[in-house]
Amino acid sequence: MRIMMFAHNGSLNRGCEAIVRSSTNIIKEKMKGAQVYLASAKPETDHILTKLDGIYDGSTQHIRKYSFAWLRSSLQVKLFKDESYALGKMNSNIVKHIPTMDVCLSIGGDNYCYGEQPGWYEINRRVKAQGKKLVLWGCSIGSEDMSERKLEDLKLFDLILARETLTYHMLRSRGLKNVELCADPAFTMEKEELALPQGWQAGNTVGLNFSPLVAGKNPQAGQAVRDLIHHILATTEMTIALTPHVIEGGNNDYEILEEYWKAFKHTGRVILLPGNLTAIQYKGYIARMRFFVGARTHATIAAYSNFVPTLVLGYSVKSKGIAKDIFGEEKLVLSIDDISDSRKLIQSFNEMVIEEEEIQTTLRSAIPRMKMMSYKAVEYLHALAK
C-alpha cells in the first residue's frame, strides 16, 4: 500500500510536522507494509521526519510567461473560463506522483478554513480521475468557511476524517455521507525531553505561546497578553516559559515572543525557549509545565496530551471542537475577540489555576479516549484501502 500525503507546507510549522510525524507512525503501526510518502512545499524543512519512505518536492511551479504552457492556459481561461490546465501545471510536482500511489491523503488539517483552494481542488480531481483513493485527513472546517464550490470538492473524497465533532456535525448537516469522526493524530505523538533551561521551576512553570496570526487578526490581543504576563508575575511565584511553535518566515512565533522576553527578562522569571526545536522537543518541554496558555493548536494538543491544564487562545472551529471533545464543553477557549480583553484573559487564567486538579483529572480520563480516536482514523483508512 503506497500512501502519499500532500497539502503540507513544510515542517517549520511544528504543527504540520506533528501531523506528518504522528500520522506516519500510526499508519505504519496499524497497516503492515504501508509505505508513506510526503509531497512538501518546503521539502528542505522535512529531513527531521525519518520514518517516511520518501519526501518529494511538492512546491508550486510558476508558468513561464510566453511559454507554450502559458499560451495554452491563457487561451483556456480566456475562451472557456477553464483553469484546470494551468492549475495542473502549477501543481505538477504533486500530480506527477499520483499514478504510483494507491491512496492520496490531503493532510493540511485546516487548509479548508482559508477561502477557496483551486489548486487543491484540481489535484483532488486528478486523483479521482486516475482511480485513486482520496482522503481528507484530520480536518477542521467551520460553517463560515463553506461554499458551494468547496462542497462540490468535498463530495469527491472517498473519506473525510473530521478531527472534532463540530466539524463532523457541520459536514454531515451539509449532506456529506463520506465523513467519519476521529481525533488529531498528534495526540499520539512521542516527546523528547531536553535539559531544562536556567530559571525553569520544576512543577511551577507556565508555558505561553502567542502567534503573529492571532496578533494580525486582533491587534489589541498583544497588549492583553502583556497584561497577563504582568498578572502572573505579580500574583504568583511561577516562571513563564515563552514557547514558539511556528518558526517560518512571515509567521514566526519566536519573533513576537522575543519582544515579550526583552520586556520582562529583567524579572528573572521569564525565559524564551529556542526557536529551532522540533515538535517532539517542544512537546518535551510542554509536558513538564504546570499550566499552558497557547494560540497554536498543536502546542495546546501537546499540553492536553500530557495532562497539562491549558487555556486556548482560539481563532477557529478546531480549538473549540477539540476542547469540546475533551471536556464536553468549550472549556477555557477564548475567541479571537475575547483575547483582546485583558480582564477576560486574566479571569480565564485564574479559573484554570483554581480548577487545576479538576482539569488534570478530566484530562487523565479523556486523553486515552482521544488517542483511541486518533487511531480510529487508521481503521477507517485501512477499511477504505482494502
Image (spheres, rainbow, N blue to C red):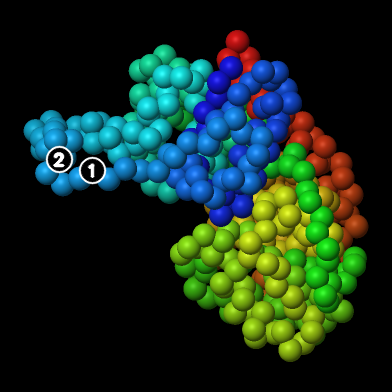
User: Which residue corresponds to mark 2?
Assistant: 67
Q: In this view, does 101 lie to the left or right of 33?
A: left
Does residue 80 sit above or below 285 in this rendering?
above
Percent x, y of residue 139 = 55, 38
Percent x, y of residue 373 = 72, 31
Amino acid type at circle 1 is Ile
Residue depicted at x 67% and y 18%: 33
Does residue 306 sit above or below 75 in this rendering?
below
Q: Can residue 322 be seen in this snapshot? A: yes
Q: Do the residues labelled 2 and 1 touch (CB within 8 Å)?
A: yes
Residue depicted at x 49% and y 20%: 101
Observer-nearest of 5 and 47:
47
User: Which residue corresponds to mark 1?
Assistant: 63
Q: Can residue 317 be seen in this snapshot? A: no
Amino acid type at circle 2 is Ser
Residue depicted at x 79% and y 51%: 192
